[in-house]
Image (cartoon, coloured by chain):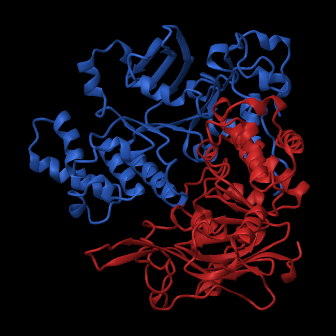
Amino acid sequence: MSLLSVEQLSVAIRGDDGIQRELVSAISFAIATGQTMGLVGESGCGKSLTAMAILDLLPKPQALRSGGKILFKGSDLSQLNNKALREIRGHKIAVIFQDPMSALNPVQQIGRQIMEVLKLHFPKQSNAIHRARVLELLTEVGIPAPAERLNAYPHQLSGGMRQRVMIAMALACEPELLIADEPTTALDVTIQAQIVRLLKKLQAKNGMAMLFITHDLALVSQLSDHIAVMYAGKIVEYGPATQIFSQARHPYTQGLLASLPGAGHPPKSPLHSLDGQVPAIDNMPVGCRFANRCRYAQDICQTPPANEVITKQADSHEVVSVACHLWRSISP
Amino acid sequence: MSLNNDKAILKVNALQLHFGQGGGLFRSSRTYLRAVDGVSFKLYEGETLGLVGESGCGKSSLAKALLNLHKPNAGSVHYRETDIAGLSDSAMRKYRRALQMIFQDPFESLNSRHTVEVILEEPLIIHKVGDRESRRRRVAELLEMVGLPLSAASKYPHEFSGGQRQRIGIARAIALEPEILICDEAVSALDVSVQAQILNLLLDIQQKLKLSIIFISHDLAVVRHMSDRIAVMYLGQIVEIADAESIYSQPRHPYTQGLLASIPRLGETSPIEAHISGDLPSPIAPPSGCRFHTRCPHRQARCEQEAPILQANEGSEHATACHFWPEIATTRLLA
């Protein structure tokens, strides 16, 4: 059974005019215990909204979950009340965001901030136990001289160190699922490599599952067991990481991969580029949302493509699905 | 590409740019942030020189010093044979006309209250190019060159997407037919599919206008794609400079090696190596000796005391600032 199974999730935004516009449309995916799923897509495709919808962190009342189920270990999170959800948030499912500076409290020492999580979820344990655990966490995430850093304020730390503090806080209760939303995007590559290695190490140790959200295709290819590619609020392709990158089936995935510098392009040669733009939210086509930029588009693309499951094996996690009418004729 | 000395369009020699911090009326201790600390290089005609390094290494400060937007503390910048430090105001205007810049955030660098036509016409007016009629024609020509429709002229920057705004930024930069273009993280804010469009446009324009480009980016794959030569910066200094192919296939400096090993590669499932430990030290009090020694896996006692000099072997253009690079190269071969 999957640890997290998202079924037909939709997220809508209510504009000032009172009209609801769907930014995430009926997406489904699943994550198994100990596995990493990468959710990739360009800005505005709805990947962060998906992450926020899972834990009901959407900015209300403008944004709301307009449909679907979020099954965590079999129980539907969307049916839980606030109190029950609070026990899961930060405890069973933790989140780290792109910008640790805005996620950390600037006027509280980092040691206290991490202890707050422990106090909330383990109110019966003593302060001394919590303090020891905070030290252990800071050591685990590789913060040098952790005992001295306990009293540091976020602004006294570098970006990489702040992200480590965020990770320590997220791991405080040994979550079963970690949602990481662009956790290394604001960091330099050498620091990114340190953070990614740390996440992998901790994952191997705790058997934690991860939902890794990023726009960086190369990074996600190195981290993930499964990958879902999002475009304009839809998952267009989903499958094992090795499959997605070696034989992308959806024209959008193919186009994205081909537009990366270095992916088979000699230096200074023209890159493959996806022309045009994502359709505006008010003007979402009924059919395939990628059709206006797709070089293979035909009449049939004016109707919505179904998520076609390609290789179905006994193990349900090896499913590859692609939402394209024409994938058979265009696959490499 | 032939690296002919005579073809150097820009010669930078021992350039320093320090920013004073703190101090004041009642405080005697004034510290200096050494943003650029003794940088020398040449930019040859028609080439693209990539400038890479992590945030805070001084890439953007160097660009600003080249444009004389910040006055360097020491060292010199020669444009062809002229030292730009001694230029009169009118000569400086001419120099700035030859050297244009594209910024990371086209939204912040375009005046939001002006139409695209006004934005593109402004540099022509300032530099007294043509009459109104010919300027209008030039604006239309520029829009076509960067792949925007003529109707864009009467619109405002907010009506465009990020990629289109960057096209406007490029059109403005080439309006005066510069010889040198500095692209400071010009595609960093863009999604990959749009990034590809803009990179293609830059390559195209470079060929048409025979531009020399300084391409600054933290994205090593993008720099590799765009550059003929690459300079790697660390804490205000160039630690390695060579042709792009050598930098990527035979990096010599341990920092370059670590930087390259840190880039995630598509479809490579082996765990990402974290070669370089720790954070960037403060540029206010950089480490003694070799500035990289605090994070270097190969450091020895000498590295803490003696600063290595950026030098190339006889007959080679591949220069490295490391005491021990030949030894490191040998051990890498054996490993």
Q: Which chain is red?
A: B
**Above or below, A20 relative to A309:** above
What x and y, as percent, mark residue A97?
42, 40
Specify the quadrant that holds the C terminus of chain A. Answer: top right
> Is residue B207 found left or right of A240 in the rendered image?
right
In the image, what residue occupies the spot 72% across and 30% down?
Answer: B155
Q: How many numbered marks have been drawn onto this rendered protein structure? A: 0
> Is residue B141 found left or right of B186 in the rendered image?
right
> Is residue B27 found left or right of B193 in the rendered image?
left
What x and y, as percent, mark residue B19?
47, 72
Give the drawing colour for chain A: blue
In the image, what residue occupies the spot 81% across and 47% down?
Answer: B200
**Above or below, A97 relative to A249:** below
Specify the quadrant that holds the N terminus of chain A. Answer: top left
What x and y, as percent, mark residue B213?
77, 62
**Residue A41 seen from this side:** yes
What x and y, as percent, mark residue A82?
27, 18
**Residue A264 seen from this side:** no
In the image, what residue occupies the spot 45% across and 53% down?
Answer: A195
In the image, what residue occupies the spot 76% across and 57% down?
Answer: B225
Q: Quadrant of residue B249?
A: bottom right
